Image: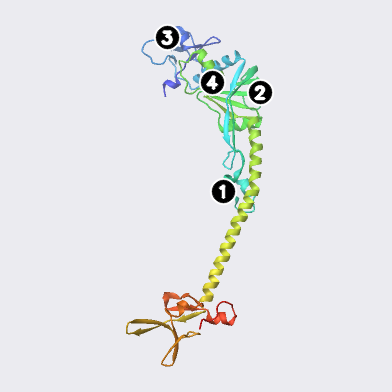
Amino acid sequence: MASILKLPYGLQGNQLLHIKDVPNGLACACVCPGCGARLVARNQGKVKTAHFAHYQAPECATGLQTALHLAAKEVFLQQQTFRLPGAAGIIGFHADHFDKQAYFSSFAYDAASYQQAVENRLDLDCEYAFDARYVRINQVLLEHRTGDIIPDIILETEAGPLLVEVAATHFIDEAKQEKIKRLGISTVEIDLSKVSRELSSDALTDLLINQIDRKRWAYNARLDAKVAARHAHYLEAARPLFAAWHAELLHEQQEEERERQRQQQRKEFYATQIKPITFKGKRYGTARQVLGCPDPRRSFDGQLYSNVDADCLRCAHFRGYGAERKSVICLYEYTNRHKIPGYESYK
């Protein structure tokens, strides 16, 4: 990390000079662009990365940022074009640029629970992307106050005003981001924190003007407006699907509840149609009998009964067993009382 923060530029009068363009030691006759302290050039010997160092003074925190700002400004003053970075993203329920809580609170039901299902069924293009492109520079303003911020560089381009922030140690924070949004001016931030301090002037020019790997949109007014419009359309298109999905699930829940009630009613009804099973020992096993059968099939010693295995299981009125199979559910009396067709006795 130490080599990344070394100072590659010194100020000689009003001229910013690269470490490779000055003699070694104090002969460089340069001062720190940040604090004005005298610099010593270390560009010979076994030093791995040539750099300026403060002479008999502590290293300041602003020298690097100020030096790179000055170098970048000199580059832009000499250029006629600037390459804007591209952008890509996804419009959906996970987007950062809408109040998700407010949107889902606008429904009379918990629409958020259907988010994934609806997102998979929403037949809309939720992706956006555009390529990097060049714009012509008409004018360059340096350190010019705009609103309540002083951007590093303001470019007046054929596409409108553009703020350029050059970051080496200090990047756009949330407070500045909000100020930029309130201004409504598109802003590109260029990250120079990890570029080589041995970068030549031509290489720095190419990086600032042509390359896009270190550029990002801190704010893009036109893109935000377009994305916001498409996102609003996306969210509104989801509303009828949310309603349909909610109605579908509500119907399923109602059907499940009705079936649960039917099962409960059936269970309660069957509990009133119980006939106990009597177990009688026989020579070759134990017989299961229903002595209280309303339509008995057999008699023994003057007692009428039905055999569970031989008679009940074949009977149209049999509806299964009661608890622990110690009784049978018999609908004979109910079906005959209500004259239900198809349940006549087979006697």
Between 147 and 123, the one lying in front of the other is: 123
Q: In the displayed structure, would residue 49 be above or below residue 314?
A: above
Colour mapping used in the image:
rainbow
Circles 4 and 3: CB distance less than 8 Å? no
The dot on residue 161 is: 2
Q: CA distance from mark 1 to mark 3?
A: 69 Å
Which is in the foreground here, disc 4 or disc 1? 1
Q: What amino acid does circle 2 point to?
A: Pro
- N-terminal of the pair, mark 2 or mark 1, is 1
Q: 10 Å neighbourhood of mark 1: few (<14), some, or many (≥20)? A: few
Residue visible at 58% across and 65% down in the picture: 258
Residue 20: x %, y % from top left: 46, 10
Q: What amino acid does circle 1 point to?
A: Ala
Q: Name the residue furthest front.
A: 347
The dot on residue 307 is: none
Circle 4 sits on which residue? 211
Q: What amino acid does circle 4 point to?
A: Gln
Which is in the foreground here, disc 4 or disc 3? 4
User: Which quarter of the image is occupied by the N terminus?
Assistant: top left
- N-terminal of the pair, mark 4 or mark 1, is 1
- N-terminal of the pair, mark 4 or mark 3, is 3
Circle 1 sits on which residue? 117
Q: CA distance from mark 2 to mark 1?
A: 42 Å
Residue 55: x %, y % from top left: 44, 14
